[in-house]
Amino acid sequence: MANQPTLSLAAGYHLRAKALCDGRVKLKNFELKAIAFENDGEGHDEFMAGKYDAGEFSLAMYLALKSRGAPFMAIPVFPNRKFRQSYIFVPDGSPLTDAKQLKGKKVGIPSWLNTAGLWARGILRDEYGVQAADIHWVMPRKNKVDVTLPAGTRLDVVASEDSLAARMLKGEFDAIIVPDFPEEKGWRRLFADSKAVEQEFFQRTGIFPTSHAITFHAAYLEKNPGAAQEMFDACEAAKNLALRDDADATYSNFVWNRQVWEEQRSVMGADPWKFGIKQNEKVLNTIVRYAGEQGLLANKVTINDLFVQIDEAS
């Protein structure tokens, strides 16, 4: 409809957003203009700068900003999730084979406000007894938000043109925790069988860590309160199309994708990407706890503070 208000979305580059971006899923009362960003940081920055009404946004940054009264409001849509035991990397020749061996070591991270690192540090503490203060952390640039580090924690800013992986391979770090796999060669995962570690972690805890949430500028929702529910429903529809495609062995480029699909269903069920508060209360309370323990929060926040009330069965 010509008179429909526009709702612009900075989306992630993945199948769960594809149907929003290519127009297969539409909103009833808004004209959705969704753009997929291959570079997450670029999409986050453009959303924060006001170029988009909503964005797939870093949960760690959202928690930090929301606890400081920033004018954002999220809906319980979590399109980017990864287990983070797989994202602790060491050089091929490293003697490190166990998380507890990271105590006293130097570890490179993109930022203290990076959600992958937030999860990894929390898991290191909960699962392996490795406290933030047990590691010497190094990041290439200052945090965008001032944080209060846990007592005794050493965090240095050491700038470099090189990637964290390249710096690790030159011997500057014993390990790195980064959100994506390094392009360089010469590294391995700290956990040799990380998939087994992650599957056991999920089966025991029920936690599938979420990195992003769909977040609005609060002023947009004040003007268009119905946008939250419509976006939730649209994201659910787009995700369901992606799940349908996953079941089609012809759709994917992966030769053995059907076996992977079967294995995932046996461990995590038909829909690991569940949206809504009811299905994610434990994972959300855990990341809020981690954010508090790691000094990201200026003031206490709860799930009710962070997410719009949504009819999850609409």
Image (cartoon, rainbow, N blue to C red):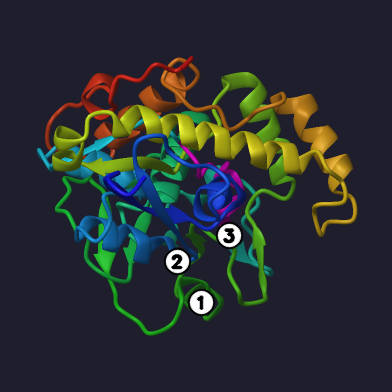
In the rendered image, which residue does mark 1 sit on? 171
Q: Residues within 10 Å of mark 3 (few under 14, many from 20)?
A: many
Residue 185 is covered by the magenta coloring? no
Prevalent SS, magenta region: loop
Q: Residues within 10 Å of mark 1 (few under 14, many from 20)?
A: few
In the rendered image, which residue does mark 3 sit on? 89
Circle 1 or circle 3, nearest the eye: 3
Q: Which mark is residue 217?
A: none
Residue at 12% x, 37% y is 298
Task: Indicate the position of residue 173 as horizontal and vertical percent values.
Answer: 46, 69
Task: Indicate the position of residue 109 as horizontal and vertical percent values.
Answer: 40, 61
Amino acid on which the number 1 mark rests in the picture: Gly
Residue 59 sits in quarter: top left
Mark 3 / mark 2, whichever is N-terminal: 2
Circle 3 or circle 2, nearest the eye: 2
* Residue sitting nearer the eye, 273 or 134: 273
Element assignment for label 1? loop
Amino acid on which the number 2 mark rests in the picture: Asn
In the rendered image, which residue does mark 2 sit on? 39
